[in-house]
Amino acid sequence: MAKPSMAKPKSASKPPNARADEPPYAVLLLGLLPLIALLVPSLRPASFSSLPSIVTSIESLIPKPPPRRGVVGTPLPDVPFLPIDLEAAGSLSPADLGPLPVYADYDNSSWWGHPVSRGSVPHLGTKGGHESDFAVLPGIVTAAEVDAILRIANATFGGEFDADPDSVDGMASHEIFLDSDELREGRTAGSLKGDATPGGRAEREAMRRQLKEVTDPILSSRLTPFIRESFPDLCASPGRLCTPCYSLVRRYRPGERLSHQPHRDAHARVTAVVSLSVHGVDYRGGIYVAAARSDKRVAALGRGDAIVHSSDLLHGVSVEDDGGERWSWILWFRDSETCEDHSDEWFQRGAEEGGAVALAMLAERNPEGTEESMIELHKRAASGGLGSSMVKLARAHLKALPSRTLKADPDEAERLYRTAIAVAQEPDAYFGLAQMLLQGVAKPQGGSTKMADLLREAVGMLEEAAKARHPYAMFNLGIMHVYGYPRAWGQKVDTDLGAAWLEASGLPEGLFVAGNYHVANPRGRKDGKGERLLARAKAMGYGAGWRSGARDRTGSGGAGGVDLNMAWPEFPDSKIRPDQF
Ligand SMILES: O=C(O)CCC(=O)C(=O)O
Ligand SMILES: [Fe+2]
């Protein structure tokens, strides 16, 4: 099997910052006033115009760092830190990100006469050459079957999908389950899904019966045999044959969800995702495979094509925001014909072989149930070069994640974040380090004590995270531009750019602020964009009772201990500071 090395993402070119047709800042500010009044009750508008440079000494803000102790904490790979280009900071725009590259390193073969393209993805930064395999089966589901699935799923509830919080990113899920442990065991009461009410359940049961007639033959004669034969180690042990235990349909479309943050399907042994839409025609982007959160490749799936992967593959969805729409049918297979969950065994085996990803997955399952064992596993994963485990340990050292065993140690947190950036350009680490800079607990590069330099360095880090489509970084770039922070380093303020970042974040909170911006901005009134964004914010969970709890659990995707609201400093001569969301 080919072992492609996934190249580092191209760094985005610098955009022109100011637009020729841009109205003066004061005019924009007038347009923004209703939004700002809404967001910042204590704001006195006059204070904006009287803002002097906020360049000031930050020496008093930054506590003297404790002396460095020789080798500290977790043994980490010895790699140089990546510096931030302060001159470029503040000029990146969402339009610079461009589409995700398409995965192309396939080995083509066939399975019982059916074409199969196999690929693999290395675990970026980790030692030992571990990688995750996947396969694409073109046209494994026929056009007639796809049509039938879409027709039946669309007809139910006039197209209403669930809007409960997604377990990966804490936003409205926009999915509908056809099979699951909960449905089989009748454990649907009390959930936020449509099945919780007897009426909803009855209507869905009818839909599920119709869909089963279409999907059962696909599973029994094609996907299940393929999976058992293609993953013999995982799926073909006697008495432990892989079986589809969860089945769901998800959709990505304008006005709703367009992304699903990177994650691993830890509750499955093998996953199959069937595309019900055509890449490049119905939508651009789509499901991606990832060597790290900073290194994603789209699997360009046509209608009826399936991607099949093991649970350790990092993956997610990013559909371009250009009016396209994508539907997917997802199957989670377990290595049990009675759908028992044996994941721990597999992670245990991988951990014994020293795989950093397996160690981290075992840490999250935490079979021993103690904090010590969980942290020990993440430490081993971090020593093995896994950036996401470094991020978790850093958050624990900052006490953003509960931990009795790891003491508060900003120095160690900074070292972990910087190493995660060096090994895998980990966007969560860029975000965490930017937050530490704003909080005054990390040291700016080059030792500058100017507030402007500190802000620029934090912004540069957010832009690095935003290049990897980190939603919290995009949100905060939006806040930073809308509230005019670039004036601190003499850059022209571009509030439209702020609104674009807020929208690009796809977060309910970002869509809400961007929506208000466009409603307040005279240029935005005519096309109804503001109202559309506000409706989308609501559809994604803005104002829902569950959103803040879900956000605490999932953070910027898959892990808590990270705050959406960054510690933007107060402008010295006024009370301007972004509101908290
Ligand atoms: O919609 C997709 O293509 C994949 C979604 C996914 O990864 C999941 O639900 O776990
Ligand atoms: Fe998934």
Image (cartoon, grey):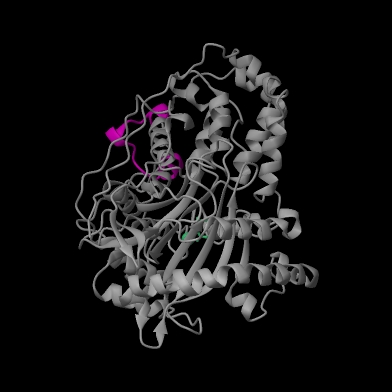
Tell me: residue 9, above or below residue 312.
above
In front: 531, or 380?
531
Magenta stretch: residue 179 in it? no
Q: Is residue 54 visible?
A: no
Q: Residue at coordinates 43% horizontally, 45% vertically from top-left?
A: 431
Q: Quadrant of the N terminus?
A: bottom left
In front: 441, or 212?
212
The residue segment tinted magenta is 434-453
Left or right: 485 in relation to 160: left
Q: Position of residue 339 (x, y in %)?
A: 50, 81
Tell me: residue 506, above or below residue 329.
above
In front: 520, or 578?
520
Q: Position of residue 403 (x, y in %)?
A: 43, 67
Quarter of the image for residue 438 reads top left
Magenta stretch: residue 435 in it? yes
Q: Give the main secondary structure, helix, strand or loop, of the magenta stretch.
A: helix
Q: Position of residue 535 (x, y in %)?
A: 71, 41
Q: Residue at coordinates 38% horizontally, 53% vertically from top-left?
A: 289
Q: Position of residue 279 (x, y in %)?
A: 48, 45
Left or right: 277 in relation to 349: right
Q: Residue at coordinates 44% horizontally, 73% vertically from top-left?
A: 224
Tell me: residue 80, above or below residue 93.
below
